[in-house]
Amino acid sequence: MRYSRQTFFSLGLCFALVIFAACGKSEPPRSPQATASPPATSTAPPPAAPAATVTVTTVELGKQIGADKRVTQQMTSFAPKDTIYATVVTNGSAPSATLTAKWTYQDGQVVNESTQSIAPNGPAATEFHIAKPDGWPTGTYKVEVSLNGRSTATKEFEVKG
């Protein structure tokens, strides 16, 4: 089958008319509301998961700790040459938290202050201790435990001669 130039010309003309008609098509007029910009879509991040929380559940004092860092026998009275241990028991989880133990003598004089970073995932025990080879003065003391800079627990104890 052979096509003439006239057939190709006619087909091309029809094709051009169809394209021209489609491009020249006008849209119906829009209402004033339709010409307003579309409402902004929210690109805010999804709500954050609840903040991880850790709480101090108890502070234990004693002269010895076990492999689990827990005081083996709790007490509040010590001899001058004893090493005094404080176990801070926490519960909860966080990628990081800071525990501080501040030990003070009866008039508020700071005996020792130390800080430990923890990353608990459930119940945990953190150990702090103080020692003085030549002996602690007799009197009342206390250890104040802070979690992330906020005081959470205080334990008083006594050194007897």
Image (tube, rainbow, N blue to C red):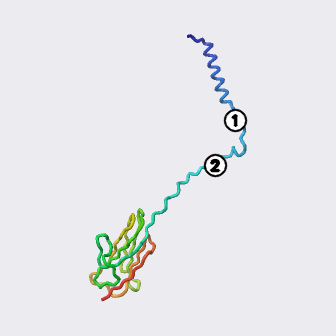
Tell me whether the residue at label 1 lies in contact with that at label 2, contact meaning CB atoms closer than 8 angstroms.
no
Residue 10 versus residue 112: which sits nearer the camera? Answer: 10
Residue at 39 percent of width and 77 percent of height: 102
Residue at 62 percent of width and 14 percent of height: 7
Secondary structure at numbered mark 2: loop
Residue 10 versus residue 62: which sits nearer the camera? Answer: 62
Residue position for label 2 = 39
The amino acid type of the residue labelled 1 equals: Glu
Q: Which mark is residue 27?
A: 1
Horizontally, residue 155 falls left or right of residue 23, namely left
Few, some or many residues within 10 Å of mark 1 (<14, 14–19, 20+): few
How many dots with numbers? 2
Few, some or many residues within 10 Å of mark 2 (<14, 14–19, 20+): few
Q: Position of residue 146 (x, y in %)?
A: 42, 73
- Residue 37, above or below 88: above
Q: Position of residue 159 (x, y in %)?
A: 33, 85
Measure how far apart labels 1 and 2 are at the Cα level. 22 Å
Q: Residue furthest bottom?
A: 161
Secondary structure at numbered mark 1: loop
- Residue 141, above or below 128: below
The amino acid type of the residue labelled 2 equals: Pro
